[in-house]
Amino acid sequence: MSISIIIAGLITGMLLGVFGSGGSIITMPALLYLLDVEPKSAIAMSLGIVAVTATITAMQHWRHGNVDLRITAVFGLFGVIGTYFGALVGVITPVIIQLSVFALVMYAAAWKMLKPEGLSKAQQHRSAGAMAVDLIVNNNELNYAHIAVHGIAVGVLTGIVGVGGGFLIVPALVLLSGLSMKKAVGTSLSIVSLKSFAGFAGYAGSVAIDYQMMAIFTIIAVIGSVVGSQLGHRLPADLLKRGFGGFLLLVASYILFKSVLFS
C-alpha cells in the first residue's frame, strides 16, 4: 500500500470531519500529483471517494444534532440534478479550464469566509441579519426556492470541476441561511454525499476508474473522518471558520500555480 494513499486518505477524511468539506480539494490533487492518475479519472475517483466518506461522516454529525434535514433535502435534490449534468459537461471540458475554475472559486469562497472577521461586531450582526432575511419569508420558513437555485448552481460547478462542493456549501449555509458553523458543517456533509454520488455517476463509464485504489483510499479516509468529526465538535466555531478560509487560500494557490501557470 502506497504511503501517499495513506497520508492523502487520512487528510481527506479529517478535513471532511472537521470542516464539512475539503475532501475533494485534497483527494483530487493527491490522485493527480501523488498517484499519477489521469486528470479526468482523478476527478471521477475523487467524487466517488468523497461520496462514501461524506455519507459516513454526516451520520456522525446527525447523531450530534448538527444536520438540518430540510435544507439537505432541498439543496441536495437540486444539487444532484446540477451535479449530474455538470459532470456530463466536465467530461468534455478541457482540463486547464476545469483546474482554473477550481482554484478561482476556492479563492472566492475563502474571501467570503474570512471577510466577516474584519468587520465590527455590530456590522457582523447587521450583515448576518440582512442575509438571513434574504432567505426567510414572512411565515419564518426558509425560502426553499432560493436554496434550490443555490443547489443547482453549486451542483453544476461540482460536476464540472470534480469537487463535492462543501467549500461552497458551508459559506452559503453560514452566510446566507444563517446556520451556525457546526450545523453548516454537518448539513454540508449530507449534501456533499448526495451530490458526489451523482457526480460519480455522471463520469462512470466515460473515464477509466481504478476501483481497487478507490476502495483503499476510501477506507483510510473514513478512518480519518471519524477522528476529524470528534475533533470538530471540540473546536470553537470561530476558529473553524477562520481555519477553513485559510485552508482554501493555501490549496487554491497551490492548484493555480502548479496546474495552471506552470502547465
Image: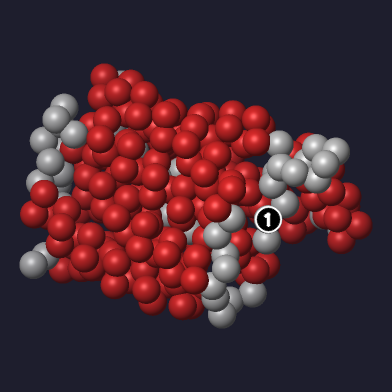
Residue depicted at x 33% and y 21%: 89
What residue is pinned by disc 1? 179
Residue depicted at x 25% and y 35%: 201
On the image, the x and y values in percent for residue 232 come to 52, 73
On the image, the x and y values in percent for residue 124 come to 83, 54
The total of numbered circles placed on residues is 1
Up the image or down, 167 lies above or below 162; here it is below
Q: Nearer the viewer, residue 217 or 29?
A: 217
Q: Secondary structure at mark 1?
A: loop
Q: Relative to residue 230, is residue 142 drawn left or right?
A: right
Q: Relative to residue 192, is residue 94 drawn left or right?
A: left
Q: Amino acid at mark 1?
A: Leu
Q: Nearer the viewer, residue 189 or 99?
A: 189
- Asked if one can make out residue 68 in the rendered structure from this viewpoint, the answer is yes
Q: Quadrant of residue 142?
A: top right
Up the image or down, 191 lies above or below 182; here it is above
